[in-house]
Amino acid sequence: MVDSDSIRHYDVRDIGSEWLCYQAPDQLQLHGFLIKTGFDDGSVRLAITQIISRAVYSASELETVRWIQENSAVCELTRYPLEKLTKDKLYKSSLRLFAYKDEMDIFKKILLKR
């Protein structure tokens, strides 16, 4: 027998929407594309964390960091260290991703034709 009143949950996070959104960058081979454009592995993980977070919870960088820290398991999926996540890093990642917007659109169209 389990006493349901005695059960406590610690550090519970959402993963459903994050997992679903994680599939798109994976299928589009975004990691490899970003590596070819000069991103290092940590920057790629942060960028994919940023993309998934914006898809699931569209908010400011500050609010996104709070949401990830308190509610989301996106960093567990992308393997980006939660303790390194800041609003400034998300902001810089957004700017860097935007610089490659046209190339990512072309890359996506090529992959979807396969």
Image: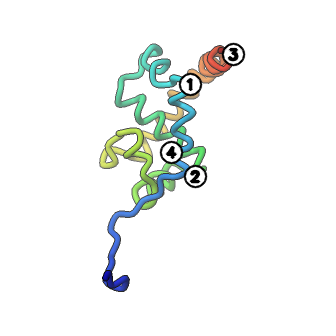
Tell me, for residue 113, which label it has, or none. 3
Give the spatial CA distance, label 3 vs label 2: 29 Å
What residue do we see at 42% from left, 18% from top? 35
Amino acid type at image mark 4: Trp
Tell me, for residue 57, which label it has, or none. 2
Does residue 73 appear left or right of residue 27 in this picture? left
Amino acid type at image mark 2: Tyr
For marks 3 and 2, the one nearer the N-term is: 2
Circles 3 and 4, Cβ within 8 Å, touching? The answer is: no
Q: Sort mark 1 into few (<14), some (14-19) or many (20+) by Cα contacts within 10 Å.
A: some
Residue on which the image places disc 1: 28
Residue on which the image places disc 4: 19
Give the spatial CA distance, label 1 vs label 4: 15 Å
For marks 1 and 4, the one nearer the N-term is: 4
Q: Sort mark 2 into few (<14), some (14-19) or many (20+) by Cα contacts within 10 Å.
A: some
| Quarter placement of the C terminus | top right
What residue do we see at 55% from left, 27% from top? 27
Amino acid type at image mark 3: Lys
What is the residue that sits farthest to the front in this orientation?
A: 1
